[in-house]
Amino acid sequence: MKRIALGFGWLGLAWVGLGLVLPLISDSASAATPAEIAKTEYEEVMALTPDLQNGRKVYITCAVCHRPEGWGTPEGTYPQIAGQLRSVIIKQLADIRARNRDNPLMYPFSMPRILGGAQNIADVAAYVAQLPMNPQNGVGPGTDLELGAKVYKDNCVKCHGNQGQGDEPEHMPAIAGQHFNYLIRQFEAIRDGRRKNSDPKMVEQIKGFSPREEMAVLDYTSRLRPSADRLGPPNWRNPDFQGYVYPGSPGPALPPPPAPAPRP
């Protein structure tokens, strides 16, 4: 890389001695964009053969927020990722790592020093994709479902499928069974341009939705059911994480304090 040194009279000696240099602007202009970096990693990961056993180990990092089952939280802070299409999981991880999608909560956990490289992404994506889904995800109020069904049919079926099943080759996410409050957050982030990796066609399509149409279609979407073979039983617990302590449950018993030393 070409570099140019800073020097101003006697101060120049100090700058040069410290080796402080600036890259030429023409060099930085040729750097790959976040979208290009993410695309390269996506293609690399998709070409790998996943190892489910390693994916289970890698998923320990994810279970901190998404829980061992991958069911997320109904209030929408964390989405249900269990049963999501493998290509979608890989693309979103690649986008977050490359800063092509802003996600401050997840970004640190997605970094190679924590999550690992391309093979670990392939493995954990396959592991998550085969997890059974929550049969009782968070849903909306159910007050305007007829309108929601119409808006969904007119605007969403082509990409997300008639039952919200998504599209694996096109890495269109499955949205059936997703928490209502998470759907709201992502819809608004896409509409407002805060989710940089959004499909431009979707941004254009939804920007004219009225508040009523938005709430109706997201309520309807939250009630779309994945196929029965993809659902777990209510209150299912992932047997791969038998030692996990769930929020609100009592933790393991603490050992008794040591007896005081006898006084001389």
Image (tube, rainbow, N blue to C red):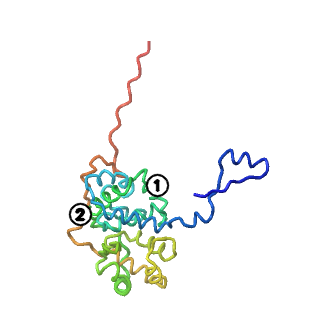
Q: In this view, does 215 lie above or below 52?
A: below
Tell which of 192 and 181 is nearer to you.
192
For the residue pair 35 and 191, the one nearer the viewer reads as 35
- Assess whether mark 1 and mark 2 are in contact (beta carbons under 8 angstroms): no
Q: Residue at (48%, 72%) from the top-left corner?
A: 189
Residues 128 and 216: in front is 128
Count of numbered tags: 2
Question: Which residue is most to the front?
Answer: 2
Amino acid type shown at disc 1:
Pro
**Foreground: disc 2 or disc 1:** 1
Residue 215 visible within the image = yes
Left or right of residue 108, residue 173 in this image: left
What's the mark number on residue 11? none
Image location (x, y in percent) of residue 31: 53, 64
Whole-number angstrom distance, CA of label 2 to CA of label 1: 30 Å
In the image, residue 236 above or below residue 167: above
Tell me if residue 59 comes above or below residue 77 in the rendering: above
Residue hosting label 1:
108
Q: In this view, does 213 lie to the left or right of 178?
A: right
Q: Is residue 75 visible?
A: no
Residue at 28% x, 50% y: name it. Answer: 241
| Label 1 element class | helix
Q: What element carries label 2?
A: loop
Q: In which quarter of the image is the C terminus?
A: top left
Tag 2: Cα neighbours inside 10 Å, few (<14), some, or many (≥20)? some
The x and y percentages for residue 217 are: 39, 80
Quadrant of the image containing the N terminus: bottom right
- On the image, the x and y values in percent for residue 163 come to 28, 78
- The residue that label 2 is drawn on is 232
